Image: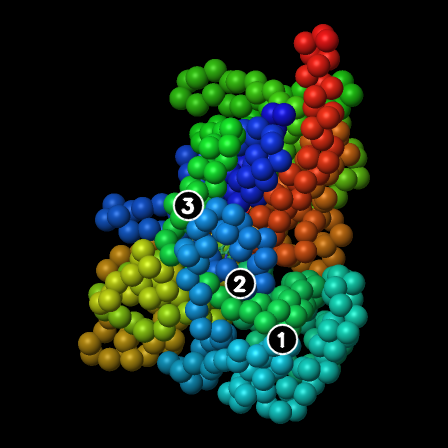
Amino acid sequence: MRVAIAGAGLAGLACAKYLVDAGHQPIVLERRDVLGGLVAAWKDEDGDWYETGLHVFFGAYPNMIQLFKELGIEDRLQWKQHALIFNQPEKPGTYSRFNVPDIPAPFNVIISILRNNDMLTWTQKFKFAIGLLPAIIRGQQYVENMDQYDLLAWLEQQGIDERVNSDIFIAASKALTFINPEDVSATIPLTAINRFLKERYGSKVAFLDGSPTERLCQPMVEYITEKGGQVRLNAPLKKIMTEEDGTVKGFLLRGLNGAADEVLTADAYVSAMSVDALKLMLPAPWREQTFFKQMSKLEGVEVINLHLWFDRKITEIDHLLFSRSPLLSVYADMSNTCKEYADPNKSMLELVLAPAKDWIDKSDEEIIAATMAELKKLFPNHFDSDNQAKLLKFKVVKTPRSVYRAVAGTQSYKPTQKTPIDNFYLAGSYTKQEYLGSMEGAVLSGKLAAKAIAQDYPATKQLDKEIAAVGI
Ligand SMILES: Cc1cc2nc3c(=O)[nH]c(=O)nc-3n(C[C@H](O)[C@H](O)[C@H](O)COP(=O)(O)OP(=O)(O)OC[C@H]3O[C@@H](n4cnc5c(N)ncnc54)[C@H](O)[C@@H]3O)c2cc1C
């Protein structure tokens, strides 16, 4: 059965991968000339990679890890020491580590918290633990119900003091969703904490050994095409064409460089585009339906990814770092963390700027100047002395609409992969799945969309259709 999928981000590619596994023929149509959507990466004029986002994988990503295994590329995940590392703004140039011992969950995480005396006092640790009890005992349903509160309100309600918020939750909230605790749904950090408390290696971090486009998306394309599917770049969906009964008649693709538009027909259709792109393209009759109407509550959040190349090593740390800076979120020295970006003598810092609402329209030069001011606080030794580290070059990648803005009260608006339209499905990290707006969420959503299609179009139903078509 032919399935047309618009969007070659991780969700669209995962959907195609699981459809070929189920014996179907997906055709993935990507608007741009690069694979990966929010994980897309490019090479600059010197052959250095720059990316849409600094991406890390967690041990608590079962669908992603299974996908790596199925593609035979598991060795491309470079697992780091089991720890979370935070900068200490009050002591510039120093770090506070939560080292997670190799013992069963949740004791490993609890011990890592108890052992850390830089960030939390014993009273704060105690109140924090008590505050988390309902989430631990009552599980995911409690976590989902907490979507009615923003994180700050939830922390206040649990009696967890402001210091825990400023020390840990601002950093976590910015890292997970690119917004601050006064906006983010309490469900988001609670979901992450719950997973970390349940799985022994849940909070362990891995970096890919090269660019996601080449090292993850390309093998997915090879897998899909070897099994009879197709992936087409420069194939933008222009319009979803509908029949009188509202089902999809075809995908109209915009012809590029003077070429005519093309109508592509299939047995089923999937949008694996971002929610913002899909909303612009919804056929008029669908917009009246509650299922699609609710999507108006979902929209992508601004984020900026920065790359700064220096003339020397700024740090030897081979790990993800939480900057705890008001301007920046997480960062890493990719010359240490990623095999293909490795350099023994020079650093390439990749940093996420979030929240980015007030920065997205600023010039690259303004953004870099503000970032350098923050780096002086993070690495005083390299920027305050006479012998200052020299910035060799930089790249700024702005994404005005990235993952959906996970503010309080939005969880229930996330659509399922199966839609009220018989032959139309959704994939994307913004759809209903249990892993936040993440790479894991994108892969799981693609898998769930493929599963829904395989259930609706089992092999026998397809055979009936083929028999009817040849008139037997
Ligand atoms: C800065 C940053 C850092 C991040 N860090 C992490 C991290 O550390 N860990 C983690 O798990 N997640 C992280 N994420 C989130 C993760 O990247 C996303 O959740 C995931 O990649 C989303 O995949 P998707 O397929 O759902 O959507 P997208 O990647 O948005 O894919 C949608 C695709 O649809 C295409 N498209 C749009 N319109 C059309 C059209 N008209 N026709 C055809 N195609 C179209 C787009 O070009 C795109 O390729 C990060 C994201 C960013 C931006």
Q: Where residue 77 sits in the image (x, y, percent)?
A: 44, 58
Looking at the image, is 351 positioned above or below residue 248? Answer: below
Q: Where residue 202 sits in the image (x, y, percent)?
A: 58, 67
Query: Residue most toward the top?
Result: 471
Which residue, given by chain and number where applicable, does mark 3 sit on?
Answer: 213
Q: Residue at x 64, y 73 (%)?
A: 197
Looking at the image, is 194 positioned above or below residue 440? Answer: below
CA–CA distance between discs 1 and 2? 15 Å
User: Closer to the camera, 297 or 417?
Assistant: 417
Which residue, given by chain and number where applicable, does mark 2 sit on?
Answer: 58
Q: Where residue 384 sits in the image (x, y, percent)?
A: 28, 78
> Which image quarter is the C terminus in?
top right
Dot 1: within a 10 Å radius of its alpha carbon, few (fewer than 14), some, or many (20 or more) residues?
A: some
Q: Quadrant of residue 191?
A: bottom right
Dot 2: within a 10 Å radius of its alpha carbon, few (fewer than 14), some, or many (20 or more) residues?
A: some
Q: Quadrant of residue 378?
A: bottom left
Mark 1: amino acid = Ala
User: Closer to the camera, 82 or 431?
Assistant: 82
Mark 2: amino acid = Phe
